[in-house]
Image (cartoon, rainbow, N blue to C red):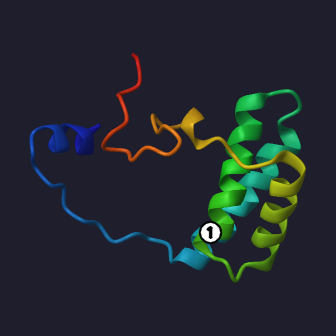
Amino acid sequence: MVVNFQLREGVLPEVKKGDYNPRTFARLLLSRAKLLLKNANDNMSEKLLGHCFVELAAHIDPRNEDAVFEYENQRIDEGEIDWSLLTNAVSGQSSKDAEPAAQ
C-alpha cells in the first residue's frame, strides 16, 4: 500500500535489497508450490497460485532442474498460465496501454 501511494504521488520508493538470492528464492517458491498443489483438492485459487509459483521458480532459477522439470510438465499437461487472471494485462498489449481493472 505504501509503494502504491508513493507511486501515485510521483515519489519513487527506495530500492531495498532482497533478503534472498534468486536460487534460494526459487527453491522456496517451488517448495511452497508443491504444498499448495498437494493440499489444493478442488480449490482453484490454490492450484493457480501453486502453478504460478512453479513457473516463477523455473524462470527465476533456470538451473534448478526440479523447478524446470515441474514447469515443463505443468506446461505440457495444463497449458500456459493465463497471467491476465492475476493482472490487468491484455494479451498482445503493453501494460501502459491496458485499461485498469474494474473495481
Q: Quadrant of the C terminus?
A: top left
Residue 71 in percent (x, y) is at: 78, 62
Quadrant containing the N terminus is top left
**Which residue is more in the foreground, 34 or 71?**
71
Q: Is residue 35 above or below residue 17?
A: above
Tell me where residue 34 appears, x and y as whole percent.
81, 54
Please tell me in which quadrant of the rendered image residue 23 appears. bottom right
Tell me which residue sits at (33%, 39%) in the image. 97
Residue shown at 68% from the left, 59% from the top: 55
Q: Nearer the viewer, residue 76 or 46?
A: 76
Q: Quadrant of residue 8?
A: top left
Given residues 6 and 98, the one toward you in this image is 98
Q: How many labels, in total?
A: 1
Residue 45 against residue 61 in the figure, above or below: above
Q: Position of residue 28 (x, y in %)?
A: 66, 64
The amino acid pointed to by label 1 is His
**Residue carrying label 1:** 59
**Residue at 72% in and 62% down:** 30
Look at the picture and state if 16 lies above or below 43.
Answer: below
Furthest toward the bottom, the residue is 63
Q: In the rendered view, tell whether residue 61 sits above or below residue 31.
A: below
